[in-house]
């Protein structure tokens, strides 16, 4: 019975992970290669792509929080004895370390004499890997608080995620660079060039913990239509609240709509969209008993895929990226072909590595 329950939940989680990383890969590829004259919201296809592009990071981060917390809560051990605590802390250091390594300012490793201020600024930019690393650390802290205060961890996750969301407009107005050095200030707001400061982005990771904990504590709930319906209701509620907020602000207060990742209306809408997407995926998953092995492999190798495709597209201190040769220069057809090629290459990579790992295991045994 336990094996069956895990099987169904893994289908749901692996589908979300695979969807998130594929969306991330194609989004980066198109953004790097598509020429400016095709980036017009008047084109329906670009409008839809641009909309989904804005949803990619929340989906990716929410899924990361869901997966980590799900695995964390599958272990019925006290906090100090839970092996997932140590694994999570190691994951934190790995993600943050890789985040800085991808933006390392020089190929000389320890000689920084030729590093320009712009390269230092790039090095200190907070990106997805830094953010997810700290998000996982915050999930661990929330779990610790919940256990020590004997609180429901889903309540603690919800409170902490809402703090990061609600506080964002206020935190983003503070001139943090005048208070902290750039490496620290970059984690608090985007004015130093950071793409994903903790406010509001860590909130998506922590909120994913709510779903992860719920799935782990209710092994059979994923099989029910009620679960998918409840996700849809919560998601729709967030979207309606967001749209009503925009309408009331415009009509009664004359406030302009701020299409920014740091406005409460956009944050609320994105939460709703992510929950709706999870609702759809969970509903589809009820209808299937198994998924192709390749989808599972993609879902389980999100970090590898993320790092490799970024190095190919943007380069690093040790290799040039495609952006230097073809950045913002391709038409729609070539861009779509390139995105499909990148997804194919990442898929072949994880399949090949899995086969190599399996063969090595056979040799050892």
Image (spheres, helix red, strand yellow):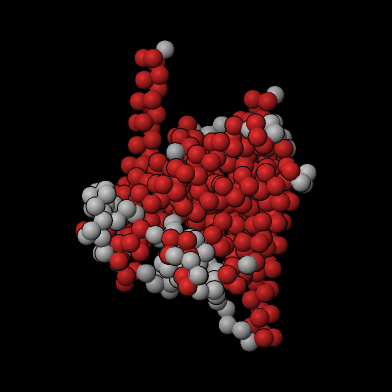
Q: Residue furthest top?
A: 365
Give the x, y percent position of residue 341: 32, 47
Q: Is residue 257 depicted above or below 56 in this figure?
A: below
Tell me the residue at 47%/73% (across/down).
178
Give the x, y percent position of residue 157: 68, 51
Left or right: where does residue 312 sit relative to residue 62?
left
Q: Quadrant of the C terminus?
A: top left
Q: Is residue 72 depicted above or below 359 in this figure?
A: below
Closest to the observer, 229 or 247 = 247
Tell me the residue at 63%/53% (across/down).
207
Quarter occupied by residue 272? bottom right
Q: How many marks?
A: 0
Give the x, y percent position of residue 146: 72, 46
Q: Can residue 163 be seen by looking at this rendering?
A: yes
Tell me the residue at 74%/51% (across/down).
155
Left or right: where does residue 307 sit relative to residue 212?
left
Q: Can residue 47 be seen by looking at this rendering?
A: no
Left or right: where does residue 4 sit relative to residue 50?
right
Q: Is residue 100 depicted above or below 31 in this figure?
A: above
Q: Residue furthest right?
A: 150
Quarter occupied by residue 238? bottom right
Q: Quadrant of the N terminus?
A: top right
Q: Is residue 339 depicted above or below 163 in this figure?
A: above
Closest to the observer, 16 or 194 = 194
Closest to the observer, 14 or 67 = 67
Left or right: where does residue 263 sit relative to residue 227?
left
Closest to the observer, 206 or 179 = 179
Give the x, y percent position of residue 268: 63, 65
Tell me the residue at 70%/34% (across/down).
78
């Amino acid at each position: 019975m336990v094996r069956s329950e895990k099987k169904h939940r893994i289908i749901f989680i692996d589908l979300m992970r695979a969807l998130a990383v594929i969306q991330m890969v194609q989004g980066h590829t198109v953004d790097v290669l598509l020429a400016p004259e095709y980036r017009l919201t008047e084109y329906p296809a670009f409008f839809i792509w641009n909309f989904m592009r804005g949803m990619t990071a929340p989906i990716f981060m929410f899924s990361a929080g869901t997966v980590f917390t799900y695995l964390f809560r599958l272990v019925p051990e006290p906090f100090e004895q839970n092996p997932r605590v140590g694994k999570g802390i190691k994951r934190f250091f790995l993600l943050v370390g890789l985040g800085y390594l991808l933006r390392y300012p020089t190929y000389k490793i320890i000689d920084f004499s030729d590093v320009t201020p712009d390269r230092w600024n790039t090095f200190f930019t907070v990106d997805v890997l830094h953010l997810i690393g700290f998000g996982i650390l915050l999930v661990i802290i929330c779990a610790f608080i919940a256990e020590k205060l004997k609180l429901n961890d889903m309540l603690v996750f919800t409170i902490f995620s809402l703090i990061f969301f609600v506080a964002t407009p206020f935190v983003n107005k503070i001139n943090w660079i005048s208070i902290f050095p750039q490496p620290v200030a970059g984690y608090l707001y985007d004015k130093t060039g950071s793409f994903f400061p903790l406010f509001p982005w860590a909130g998506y990771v922590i909120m994913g913990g709510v779903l992860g904990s719920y799935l782990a504590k209710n092994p059979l709930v994923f099989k029910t239509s009620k679960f998918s319906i409840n996700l849809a209701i919560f998601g729709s509620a967030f979207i309606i609240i967001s749209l009503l907020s925009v309408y009331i602000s415009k009509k009664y207060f004359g406030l302009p709509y701020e299409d920014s990742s740091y406005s409460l209306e956009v944050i609320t809408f994105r939460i709703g969209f992510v929950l709706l997407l999870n609702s759809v995926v969970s509903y589809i998953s009820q209808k299937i008993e198994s998924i192709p092995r390749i989808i599972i492999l993609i879902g389980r190798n999100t970090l590898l895929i993320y790092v490799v495709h970024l190095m190919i597209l943007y380069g690093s201190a040790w290799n040039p990226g495609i952006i230097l040769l073809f950045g913002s220069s391709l038409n729609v057809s070539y861009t779509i072909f390139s995105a499909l090629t990148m997804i194919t290459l990442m898929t072949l990579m994880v399949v090949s590595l899995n086969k190599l790992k399996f063969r090595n295991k056979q040799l050892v045994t």
